Amino acid sequence: MHEEMRDVIVKQADQIRHSLEVNKNASITGDFDSIVLAGMGGSGHPGDLLNALHLPAVPLTVHRSYSLPHIYGKKPLTVISSYSGNTEEALSAYSEARANNQPILVNTAGGQLLEFAKRDSVPYSFIDYPGMQPRHTLFASFTGLAAALAHSNLAKNIQEELEKTADMIDAKVAALETPAKALADALVGKTPVFYSSDAMGFAAKNMKIQTNENAKTAAFWNEFPELNHNEMVGMTNPQAAFHGVFLKTSTDHPQIAVRMDVTKKMYEDWGVPVAEVEIKGTSLLEQISYAVVFGLWTTYHLALNYNTDPVPVKGVEDFKAILSSR
């Protein structure tokens, strides 16, 4: 399974190119003033990334629970996103949207959700990567949905930027393994805390989630400058062996860069080690993508350090099995 994970990492760019082709005609017709994306875990990440990149033409809310929220506009589009197509919270949202005669766009790789979409003539963007973990198909899921929304005039069209980002990933993916492994070695026995600017918050959160699911260990994340107003004080009396990981870019606000430097010095004075990761890229999409790939390598090697298979998430599957029997 370790080799399976390596294969997933080195082929991340292929997800972008293939998903652009598969979803070249995906779209929905209608006049909408808002978008609600219902999706759990990795299936909700495309909505977060759309917002992080400021792509939606109308407000987009990511909903992570059953049913649907009551915070959208008068003409909402409901996006139901579930990689497996069998996530019970997503299916609940689909049922409610159908009962309310709300327009729906589905984002899935199959399962009941795809069956429902075909049965109900609901348009969908397709994640053409079966048999993988949802968190490992971020680029495929995001690219397909972004394309469908762009074709529907509901998001900025970034096809050229996506193609350029795919080239950047291919050029960098092999070289990123060595520094990522060094970080993974430093994190052994520690609880990582991933910090970034607010602009790069998606990347910090993604690294936290990859640590949880790939390395099967606890991790946390936060953003500058907010963490300087609360969380940092907790490091003066920590109850765990924390290790900071600061994600830095050349485009960080100058004052954010100062805050990172000061916070790093204070953490180290308090006995909390800090590693800095220089995130490269000529655009925010490239920077986030660079960080996502770096995080995949880091958590892959952290899993190996813990003699843990980075692919399955037995705890989640066991929970679902118990839940279904109640």
Image (spheres, helix red, strand yellow):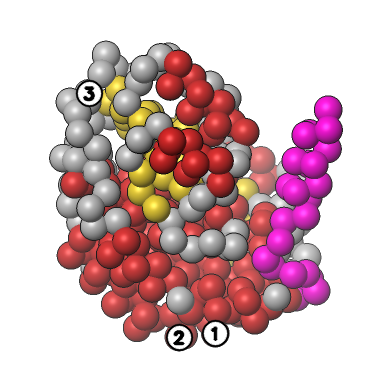
**Element type where label 2 sits in the image:** helix
Label 1–label 2 contact, CB within 8 A: yes
Which is more toward the observer, 251 or 268? 251
Tell me if residue 283 is in the magenta stretch.
no
Residue 184 placement (x, y as % from top left): 64, 73
Where residue 88 is drawn, which disc sits there? none
Label 3–label 2 contact, CB within 8 A: no
Q: Is residue 196 visible?
A: no
Whichever of labels 3 and 2 marks the residue nearer the N terminus, that label is: 3
Q: CA distance from mark 1 to mark 2?
A: 6 Å
Reading the image, the residue beneath label 1 is 178
Please state which amino acid type lies under the numbered disc 2. Answer: Ala
Reading the image, the residue beneath label 2 is 175
Task: Determine whether, in the image, residue 9 is placed left or right of residue 166.
Answer: right
Please state which amino acid type lies under the numbered disc 3. Answer: Asp
Which is more toward the observer, 159 or 129? 129
Give the class, few, some or many, for how many residues have Cα within 10 Å of label 2's Cα (few <14, many ≥20): few
Q: CA distance from mark 3 to mark 2?
A: 43 Å
Residue 259 placement (x, y as % from top left): 42, 51
Please state which amino acid type lies under the numbered disc 1. Answer: Thr
From which residue to which does the magenta span run?
Answer: 305-326
Picture residue at 20% right of the left edge, 46% below the top = 150
Picture residue at 38% right of the left edge, 73% below the top = 14
Reading the image, the residue beneath label 3 is 33
Whichever of labels 1 and 3 marks the residue nearer the N terminus, that label is: 3
Give the class, few, some or many, for how many residues have Cα within 10 Å of label 1's Cα (few <14, many ≥20): some
- Please state which of the two labelled residues, at mark 3 or mark 2, is closer to the viewer: 3
Residue 143 placement (x, y as % from top left): 33, 56
Q: Quadrant of residue 305?
A: bottom right
Q: Is residue 28 above or below residue 311?
A: above
